[in-house]
Amino acid sequence: MTFVIRGLAAAGSLAALALPAYAQTEVKIGYALAPDSHYGVAAKTFEEVVKAETGGDFEFNHFPSSGLGGEREVIEGLQIGTIEATIVSSGTLANFVPATGVFDIPFLFRDLEHARAVLDGDIGQEILGRFDDVGLHGLAWGEQGFRHITNNRNPIETPEDVQGLKIRTMENPVHLAAFNAMGAAPTPMAWPEVISSLQQGVIDGQENPLSVIVSVKLDEVQQYLTLSGHVYSPAMLLVSKPFWESLDDDQKAAFEKAGKEAAQAMRGFVDEVETTGVETLKERGMEVNELSAEQKAAFQEDIASAYEGYYETYGQELVDSIVNFK
Ligand code: PAF
């Protein structure tokens, strides 16, 4: 008997040695894409920096590939405090902070450098700060790249080629207005439904940046890729406000630093895939065409009517100040 009790006591002290001296706080981080995508790379960097800065206060559990649901559901989870962190596209962000929609306006940014400068500058940071009013805390703007159209119906060279095209858009009124103005037949849809809808022919196409097209292997369900670059696709690192408020100042500083480094890692990944992605997709059998400046101008003309609505919603002054940002 004495032997058994001593044995248990020894087992107990061994267990105590193996466990941290205090409980770690769980950080569930959800995102729509795979661990080897730009989101996965950002989430890994985020975890590494938080751990390095806080010395093990936090335990991370990753839920890639929409493991916690669509982006809207995940953001709602953050608001009620059942999920701690996420990396999301701007798809549904305007439902939470309407001003973010301004960055979804097609043909707004000249290039990645322009977009990054605006998002990291006063305009982007002011809008990021508004997430604190809606149960969230924005840590940094990341990105996905410029969005391009893929479809199974025909190559796209002129606005006529998108007439009636059943194209999935994000659940985003700015994108929806643009595709309506082009004469396409857009269907807003949450990401987790997209691949099966393409497989079943419910939709002809979708649009996403090369980072997503390569990572998700959209070439397996889509024949044509048109490098339209019709809109920049920002992403955001967000944490739950209830979670944020539970952190002390040092922990908050660690999360801010981690968010910024994760965003940089995401941008680095996007830079890489922007140079290699087209070749990869051609090798995998996609038929790729790139819109010339003249061809793009024809699409821009087509969505001029949508711009009237954008000016009404966001103010022409703001839109112009982003376009003219140097
Ligand atoms: O198309 C979308 O909904 C987004 O770009 C995606 C693929 C979920 C990544 O955030």
Image (cartoon, rainbow, N blue to C red):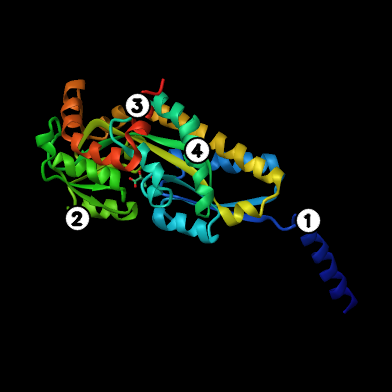
Q: What residue do we see at 29% from left, 48% from top?
A: 173
Please report contact status of discs 1 and 2: CB closer than 8 Å, yes or no.
Answer: no
Structural crowding at the residue carrying mark 4, measured as other residues with C-alpha within 10 Å and reported as few (<14), some (14–19) or many (≥20):
few
Asked if residue 147 is positioned above or below residue 201 in the image, the reply reads above
Structural crowding at the residue carrying mark 3, measured as other residues with C-alpha within 10 Å and reported as few (<14), some (14–19) or many (≥20):
some
Callout 4 amino acid: Glu
Asked if residue 172 is positioned above or below residue 12 in the image, the reply reads above
For residue 21, the mark is 1
Say which quadrant the C terminus sits in: top left
Looking at the rendering, the quadrant in which ligand 1 lies is top left
The reply, left or right, for residue 27 in relation to residue 212 is: right
Callout 3 amino acid: Val
For residue 126, the mark is 4
For residue 319, the mark is none
Please report contact status of discs 3 and 2: CB closer than 8 Å, yes or no.
Answer: no
Q: Earlier in the sequence, mark 1 or mark 3?
A: 1
Residue 209, position in %: x, y? 33, 36
SS type, badge 3: helix
SS type, badge 2: loop
Inter-mark Cα distance, 1 to 3: 53 Å
The residue beneath circle 3 is 323
Taking depth in this image into account, of 123 and 270 the one nearest to the observer is: 123
Inter-mark Cα distance, 4 to 1: 40 Å
